[in-house]
Image: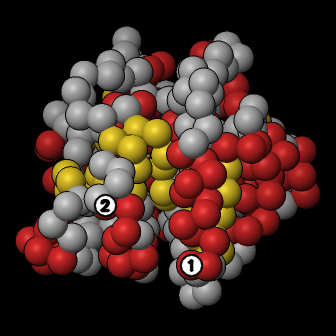
C-alpha cells in the first residue's frame, strides 16, 4: 500500500490535492493507494473524485505500507509522525521546510525550479525541473472557447477574480471572458454574475486543463495551474498573491520554452492596472504559439521505482 497526504484548506487551496491526484492517476494506477485526511475539505474532494481515503482519527496504524508521499507547506506535520515508525520510504513534494530532512526524497514538480533550490533545502536527495511536472492526462472535451480565461485556484484568498474583472470591463464586449470559480471562493456566483453579466462563470470544475487548452489568454496566480499553462504553450498574465512570488516569476522567464508569452501585473497589494489593458491586447494578439510543448520523458517512474 502507498499512503498519500495532500494538504487542503480554505486558505491554502486545492493545489496540493489536485497534484497528488494527478500523481496517482498518472503513475500509481497499479498500486493500492490510500489518501489520509484530517479535515472536511479534503474529504469532500476525495468523495467527489472517487478517491479512497481514511480519516487520520480512524486509521489503523498496524496496517503495512511501503511508501508515504506528503504534499504540504504546513510547518508542523507532527500529526504524521506515527506513520514514520515503520521506517518506510518517503517523498516530500514542493517544500523546503525543516521536516523534509527526514524524508528520502524531495521533489519539486515545476518547470521553473533549478539548481538554486539546493541551497534552500536540508536534504541531499533533491529532484526538480520540467521532467517532474505533473500534468493531468485530460482529454479536451470542453466545447466552449474563450478569449480570456481567469482562474485563481480553489479559494482565491485575495479576491483577485473580482479585482481583475473590475478592471477589464471594457473587454467583455470585445472578447469572450470565462472565469473559473473554485469551491472555496469568497465571492459568490450570483453576486459576480449580477456585477459582470457578460462574463461566463463556471465552476467548481473537475479540471482546469480543458479550459486552459481552449483559451487564448490566461490570467492567474502562482499554483499548479501554471504548469498546465506552460505545457499548453498559452500566453499568461500573472498577479501574485505574495510579494515574494516575483522571484519565482523571474525563474519562469528564465526557464519557459516561450518567455515572451508571460507577463505580470505585480502583487495583489500593488496591482499595475496601468499596464493590464495593454498586456491583454499584446498577448492575445500573439498567434501560432498554442501547440503543446513536448516535455522530456517523466522521471517519476524512476524515482518511484527506487522508493518501493
| Residue 129 position within the rendered picture, expressed as x and y whole percent measured from the top left | 74, 35
> Is residue 106 visible in this depiction of the protein?
no
The foreground one among 231 and 17 is 231
Q: Are marks 2 and 1 in contact (CB under 8 Å)?
A: no
Image coords of residue 39 (percent x, y): 25, 64
Q: Tell me the quadrant of the picture where the N terminus can be found.
A: top left
* Residue in the image at 73% along x and 68% along y: 246
Disc tally is 2
Near-viewer residue (271 or 279): 279
Q: Please tell me whether residue 286 is drawn above or below residue 303 in the rendered image.
A: below
Disc 2 versus disc 1: distance between alpha carbons? 16 Å
- The residue that label 1 is drawn on is 273
Other-residue count near label 1 (Cα within 10 Å), few / some / many at <14 / 14–19 / ≥20: some
Quarter of the image where one finds residue 195? bottom left
**Residue at the spot x=71%, y=74% of the render?**
244
Residue 44 x, y percent position in the rendering? 16, 53
Q: Position of residue 95 (x, y in %)?
A: 65, 56
* In the depicted structure, whether residue 257 falls above or below residue 161: above
Name above or below for residue 124 compared with residue 129.
below
Q: Nearer the viewer, residue 165 or 3?
A: 165
- Residue hosting label 2: 172
Residue extending furthest bottom? 269
Which secondary structure, mark 2?
helix
Residue drawn at point x = 61 percent, y = 86 percent: 270
Give above or below for 112 relative to 133: below
Q: Is residue 99 left or right of residue 10?
A: right
Amino acid at each position: 500500500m502507498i499512503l498519500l497526504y495532500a494538504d487542503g484548506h480554505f486558505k491554502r487551496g486545492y493545489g496540493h490535492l489536485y497534484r497528488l491526484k494527478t500523481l496517482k492517476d498518472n503513475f500509481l494506477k497499479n498500486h493500492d493507494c490510500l489518501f489520509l485526511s484530517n479535515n472536511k475539505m479534503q474529504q469532500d474532494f476525495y468523495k467527489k473524485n472517487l478517491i479512497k481515503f481514511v480519516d487520520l482519527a480512524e486509521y489503523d496504524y498496524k496496517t503495512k505500507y511501503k511508501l508515504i508521499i506528503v504534499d504540504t507547506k504546513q510547518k508542523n506535520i507532527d500529526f504524521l509522525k506515527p506513520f514514520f515508525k515503520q521506517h518506510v520510504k518517503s517523498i516530500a513534494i514542493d517544500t523546503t521546510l525543516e521536516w523534509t530532512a527526514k524524508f528520502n526524497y524531495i521533489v519539486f514538480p515545476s518547470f521553473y525550479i533549478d539548481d538554486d533550490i539546493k541551497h534552500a533545502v536540508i536534504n541531499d536527495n533533491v529532484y526538480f525541473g520540467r521532467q517532474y511536472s505533473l500534468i493531468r492526462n485530460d482529454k479536451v472535451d470542453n466545447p466552449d472557447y474563450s478569449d480570456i480565461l481567469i482562474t485563481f485556484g480553489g479559494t482565491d484568498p485575495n479576491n483577485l477574480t473580482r479585482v481583475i474583472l473590475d478592471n477589464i470591463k471594457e473587454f467583455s464586449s470585445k472578447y469572450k471572458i470565462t472565469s473559473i470559480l473554485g469551491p472555496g471562493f469568497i465571492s459568490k456566483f450570483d453576486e459576480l454574475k449580477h456585477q459582470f453579466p457578460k462574463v461566463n462563470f463556471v465552476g467548481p470544475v473537475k479540471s482546469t486543463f480543458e479550459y486552459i487548452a481552449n483559451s487564448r489568454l490566461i490570467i492567474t496566480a502562482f499554483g499548479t495551474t501554471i504548469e498546465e499553462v506552460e505545457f499548453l504553450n498559452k500566453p499568461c498574465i500573472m498577479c501574485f498573491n505574495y510579494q515574494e512570488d516575483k522571484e519565482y516569476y523571474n525563474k519562469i522567464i528564465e526557464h519557459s520554452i516561450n518567455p515572451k508569452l508571460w507577463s505580470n501585473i505585480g502583487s495583489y497589494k500593488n496591482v499595475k492596472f496601468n499596464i493590464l489593458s495593454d498586456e491583454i491586447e499584446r498577448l492575445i494578439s500573439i498567434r501560432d504559439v498554442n501547440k503543446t510543448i513536448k516535455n522530456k520523458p517523466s522521471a517519476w517512474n524512476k524515482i518511484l521505482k527506487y522508493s518501493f
